[in-house]
């Protein structure tokens, strides 16, 4: 099967799509040397991320084995991950509002 998304590290919870992926498409990617498949629930533009594991609200979005942001809502495998459902943790001074919700 043709690889349609890239996962760099096994602990990543998102994959980067290497083509435009229409909703309903089952994609293939490798994680930890194992091929996996997943059906996407929304259109995923080229270069955008798709969740490959459940991500809880305020949970880390993990790419390159590093947190690249926090989920602003619960995100299910197959959902598009982008600015509409994540908040960057890099270069921001206003992220305390997301963390305060957990108190």
Image: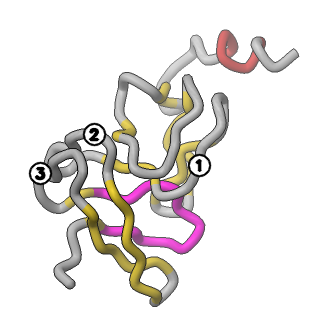
Residue denoted by label 1: 54
Instruction: Answer left or right for 18 relative to 10.
Output: left
Question: Which element is circle 2 on?
Answer: loop
Position of 95 relative to 35 (above/below): above
Residue denoted by label 2: 42
Give the distance between the C-alpha atoms of the residues marked 2 and 3, in whole angstroms: 11 Å
Q: Residue 25 location in percent, x, y? A: 22, 57
Q: Locate the C terminus by quadrant.
A: top right
Residue ID at (52%, 62%)? 12
Instruction: Answer left or right for 42 relative to 58.
Output: left
**Residue 66 sits in which quadrant?**
bottom right
Residue ID at (34%, 58%)? 39
Q: Locate the N terminus by quadrant.
A: bottom left
Kindly check if marks 2 and 1 are in contact, taking CB atoms under 8 A apart as contact.
Answer: no
Instruction: Answer left or right for 61 relative to 56.
Output: left
Position of 97 relative to 9 (above/below): above
Question: Which element is circle 1 on?
Answer: loop
Mark 2 surroundings: few (<14), some (14-19) or many (≥20) residues within 10 A: some
Q: Which mark is residue 20?
A: 3
Q: Nearer the viewer, residue 29 or 90?
A: 29
Give the distance between the C-alpha atoms of the residues marked 2 and 1, in whole angstroms: 15 Å
Position of 29 relative to 51 (above/below): below
Look at the image and give the residue range highlighted in magenta.
6-16
Question: Which element is circle 3 on?
Answer: loop
Q: Residue 60 location in percent, x, y? A: 61, 42
* Residue 8 part of the magenta-drawn span: yes
Sequence order check, earlier mark of 3 and 1: 3
The single residue placed furthest to the front in the displayed view is 24
The single residue placed furthest to the bottom in the displayed view is 33
Q: Residue 43 location in percent, x, y? A: 20, 41
């Amino acid at each position: 099967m043709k690889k349609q998304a890239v996962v760099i590290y096994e602990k990543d919870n998102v994959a980067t799509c290497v083509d435009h992926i229409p909703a309903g498409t089952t994609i293939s990617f490798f994680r930890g040397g194992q091929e996996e498949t997943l059906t996407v629930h929304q259109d995923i533009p080229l270069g955008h991320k798709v969740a490959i594991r459940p991500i809880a609200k305020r949970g880390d979005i993990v790419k390159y084995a590093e947190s690249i942001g926090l989920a602003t809502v619960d995100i299910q495998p197959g959902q598009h991950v982008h600015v509409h459902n994540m908040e960057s943790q890099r270069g921001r001074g206003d992220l305390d509002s997301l963390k305060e919700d957990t108190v």
